[in-house]
Amino acid sequence: MQHVSPVRIPLVTGGKTYHDVTQDVCRQVEAKPNVRWMAALAVALFFLGVFIYSVYRTLWYGIGEWGLNKTVDWAWDITNFVWWVGIGHAGTLISAVLLLFRQKWRTSINRAAEAMTIFAVICAAMFPVLHMGRPWLAFWVLPLQNTYGSLWANFNSPLLWDVFAISTYFSVSLVFWYTGLIPDFATIRDRAKGPIARRAYALLSFGWKGGAKHWSRYETVSLILAGVSTPLVLSVHTIVSMDFATSVVPGWHTTIFPPYFVAGAIFSGFAMVLTLMLITRVVFKLEDYITLEHIALMNKIMMITGSIVGVAYITEFFIAWYSQVEFEQYAFINRATGPYWWAYWSMMTCNVISPQLVWIRRIRYSIPATFVLSIIVNIGMWFERFVIIVTSLHRDYLPSSWAMFSPSIIDIGIYVGTIGLFFTLFLLFAKFFPVINMAEVKSILKYGVDNGPTYGGPNTGAQQSTYRPTGAPASAPVNYNKHD
Amino acid sequence: MTKRYALGIFEDEDVLLHAIENVRAAGVKIYDVFSPYPVHGIDDALGIERSRLPIAAFFYGLCGLSFALWMQIYMLGFDWPMIIGGKPHIGLPAFIPVSFELTVLFTAHGMMITFFLISKLWPRWKVPVMDVRSTDDKFVMAIELKEGTDLGNLTQLLRANGASEVNEKEMTKE
């Protein structure tokens, strides 16, 4: 029997050994794909087909295929862009911010959450690129000299900041994610039976062997990457919000946007992580790794960020009234009571009221309730972006140019299609890559299970006496390790 | 050129850390320790110095920042000044976002490229490992066997310090 700490709850349940972790995580990588996975992939591929068709229509016939008009010239595309980027933020938050805060429970969800980040950013990037109308000229956003002379990109434009922010975010997240994957690819490589699998995972593992010096450097670079990713993730949604906040449009031109958008991003991202994790843990039988405790903790983060978003909605209203600017006041009255009232109140219900249910312990620990809640939040956050973008645009300064927006079938096709693209990528990831960071989970396996390491660093004079074989009761004297 | 190694297999990180201490105290040079996850405290036990990668990362970041500022100031301030919204050509506040992003970009990628190169990590078809279980659940202490090393004594030392098995392995030097 192992001693269980009265203070620390074990992060992984089921009394797993190191080998169990390897087995449980590698199982679905090594097994033949099952019918459920194939069925899910078929559905995802169908929607990917819808995406490809809609993109073809957009490129062949132009942006006229979308439901945009002269007044509402920005609608679903930018809504979906912000929605997807926001979803991506939870992955970085889990892997970087929680690493800096030493939240060790992150280890069983960070891999899948980071994968989600990367796939969500890929989906997000589709919208601005497609909205260019001529995506083959996308390189014009880069600071390159053009053929007519040295006319450069405009570095004063938030849209250009977005290019730098999103591409930096994507590439840094990719590197962060891949570095974490290397030791796990090595594990799969060393277990692989077939020659193709062994070669493929040998390539992917970059020749990792797990030597002490390599691990030491690995930990250093993880920490530095977490350190630079944390301000990066905040900067990305700040810059996304500046796409709106720096323009002189009532309802957009507010200084509250950056923090409000960042909170909203984390809010929707955690909802998406919950949706994915609740499915993944059941399908791959990982209930011992992604426990109810994890779900409750993520629910709490969702509730806190949801409350920040709620406060931001109310603050916006207050400031509109307080500013005494007629147009600003009208924009907000129009949001709540105008023709798009249903979108506004869907947003308020989904984002402000529903996360407050998490205060109730039974809901926080309930899987069905969390699942429903996570989907409601994602719907709410989509509406938030829609409300901000469309209600501010559709009633211009001149009533003669007022218009309504209705999406075309191609708009819907591209949006639903990116969900297909996202799930295609996620399903492929879940089949061929380890969905849980094995190395990191192994390092926290003893957390809360015994009194911690007995080894207190060199020359403490306690080397021999505290030696204790695995599984022995932790009655030996304890030196608190400085890393603990 | 092949080299022979004695491999002490350990089951537990604590046992391993004490063993490293004692083996080194007995005057035996440890080639490397392979573990399935980063063992905290192993750097001190093995006498591995702190990595200087953070210093490198700082300088990469500095390069990124200087490059970004130079690029924006040169392009918009000198090479092709344009009046955009009546604002100054060199409006430093507007240059902050791109400067920040490029600082992060250079820091992260510069550091990672350095990490992969100095650790000799890159894609390869075959990876010879000391013991395949070291990426699963065992901690493997590798000690190079030179001419005249007494394997019996070494085995005894490792066993006494908690090694569950001691193997011998020949490796071709890369």
Image: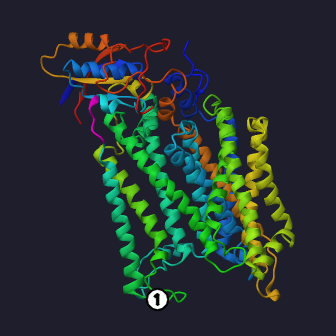
Name the side, left or right, on which B132 lies relative to A245: left
How far from the left and from the top, in percent, is residue A481?
41, 28
Is B17 colored magenta in this rendering? no
Q: Nearer the viewer, residue A108 or A410?
A: A108
SS category of the residue bearing label 1: loop
At 55% from the left and 87% from the top, the residue drawn is B85
The kind of secondary structure the magenta stretch mainly shows is loop
Q: How many marks?
A: 1
Residue under mark 1: which chain is it in? Answer: B
A474 is higher (above) or lower (below) than A171: above
* Relative side of A18 to A243, left or right: left
The residue that appears at 82% across and 86% down in the rendered structure is A399
Image quarter hosting the N terminus of chain A: top right
Label 1 belongs to which residue? B82
In percent of width and height, residue A99 lies at 50, 43
Q: Residue at x 63, y 49 (%)?
A: A424
* Whether residue A67 can be seen here: no
Q: Please, which residue is most extreme toward the front here?
A: A322
Q: Position of residue A235 (x, y in %)?
A: 53, 62
Residue at 39 percent across and 81 percent down: it is B75
Q: Residue A131 in the image: x percent, y percent?
A: 63, 73
Q: Quadrant location of residue A327?
A: bottom right
Q: Which residues are magenta?
A: B46-50
Amino acid found under the numbered disc labelled 1 = Met
**Closer-to-camera residue (B58/A405):** B58
User: Camera-side residue: A100 or A136?
Assistant: A100
Of the 4 image quadrants, the one containing the C terminus of chain A is: top left
Residue found at the far left of this picture: B148
Q: Is residue B3 above or below residue A92?
A: above
